[in-house]
Amino acid sequence: MEKGVPEKVPPPGTLTGATSGRLESVDALRGFVMALMALDHARDFFHWGALHGVDPLAPATTTPALFFTRWITHLCAPVFVLLAGAGVYLSAARGKTKGDLSRFLLKRGAWLILLEMTFVQWAGWAWRVEPKVHFALVLWAIGWSMIGLAALIHLPLRWVAAIGVVLCVGHNAFDGVNAAELGAFGPLWQVLHEGGEVALGNGHRLLAGYPLVPWVGVMAVGYAIGAWLLLEPVKRRRRLVFAGTGFIAAFIVLRASAVYGDPNPWKPGARTLESVYLFLSCAKYPPSLCYLLMTLGPALLLLAWWDLRGPAWTAPLLTFGRVPMFFYLLHLPLLHSLSLAVALATWGQASWLFGFPAGSAPQHVGTGLTGVYLAWLGALSLLLLVCRQFERLKTAHPSRWLAYI
């Protein structure tokens, strides 16, 4: 490298099929999982079972429709983290140096962690300021993954890929390690791998819902896959289909054999449908290898399909996918507000909507899945209008500050 010439990520290819330097297939897939995320959170705020702590995946308490409604939303976090990693590589391909990327990732990661523990916690979920309770959920995981990636991008691409694969594949080997047995290192282990409620002292508690190790791995793998997206269309679709099919096949083999990849090995149930439920119910907190294979495999196939076809009906998804953080920050207060309006109009009270977890809702409170889907579609319609305006604002007035939203 010549003196004075900034080091860049491997030379960029051509973003074929992109609009203004963006791959529409990536935006469509990101928008798709954002819409699914809103469905899951609509269920959290409206469905009777969610308001009363009923597990939607438990064979004894679920139905096919309820199971599918919850299960399909498992795609959200893994796909969003994977695409975030791919987006970092694509940013480099558009001319950012590794130094620029590292600085951006450090600031972006810290910003996401701050948002998780303030705005998302208080204005999104709880509607109550609880200074001694600290959420460590999806934005926390993405933020720390970006901070980790800020260091990893200085390694050769194949090393980043290898580290990502090792973290995703290998972390289940430590499922037997219990934080309670690690003494002073127990809280750190909970944050990194085990999850759960972490006592921080002086009454402060960290709700570590998204242990970090596998999520850093997913983002690193996504960064490596970003290089595929710069290949010419036929080649990149071939790789995406090959990898997606391989992930699904690996999931089926691992899950059926029950030898590795999930802390809860699969055993057939008494009925065929129960066996299917149990087969697909993989551990999400932290995401097991089986969980990641089960979700990322179909996602890569979807990405290849959208790259080939890009049907017109995906236009709303493209809008959501181009302003994902704005969508995320808006959808929780919106759904929370809609649920408050419905609760007051239908039951004349809404005390359970203040505080997180939601608390003890009266037994008669909550809707069925029809109410969930109506609330979801209504929220998406409103979000589409606002997101379109915000997308136009970002396009008309590019700003480094808007890049953080």
Image (spheres, rainbow, N blue to C red):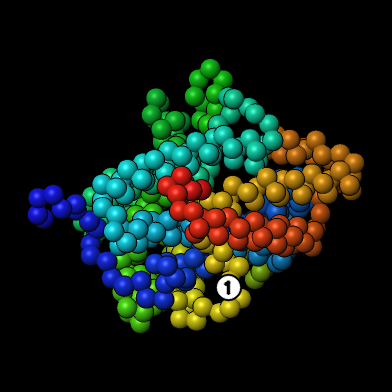
Dot 1 alpha-carbon crowd within 10 angstroms: few under 14, some 14 to 19, many 20 or more: some
Front residue (pair 175, 22) = 22
Task: Give the image location of residue 254, x and y in percent.
Answer: 43, 65
**Residue ID at (58%, 55%):** 390
As helix, strand or loop, the secondary structure at mark 1 comes to: helix
Inspect the image, locate mark 1, and give the three-letter code of the amino acid beneath it. Thr
Task: Give the image location of residue 373, x and y in percent.
Answer: 74, 62
Give the side of residue 354 with respect to residue 279, left or right: right
> Which quadrant, please, contains the N terminus?
bottom left
Q: How many marks?
A: 1
Front residue (pair 220, 59) = 220
Instruction: Specify whether residue 181 is in view.
Output: no
Q: Looking at the picture, does residue 342 appear above or below residue 18?
A: above
Task: Give the image location of residue 356, x and y in percent.
Answer: 67, 36
**Residue ID at (67%, 36%):** 126
Give the side of residue 224 with respect to residue 362, left or right: left
Q: Looking at the picture, does residue 341 appear above or below residue 61?
A: above
Instruction: Specify whether residue 112 is in view.
Output: yes
Q: Which residue is mark 1?
A: 314
Front residue (pair 210, 6) = 6
**Residue ID at (79%, 44%):** 340
Q: Looking at the picture, does residue 77 appear above or below residue 194?
A: below
**Residue ID at (56%, 20%):** 203
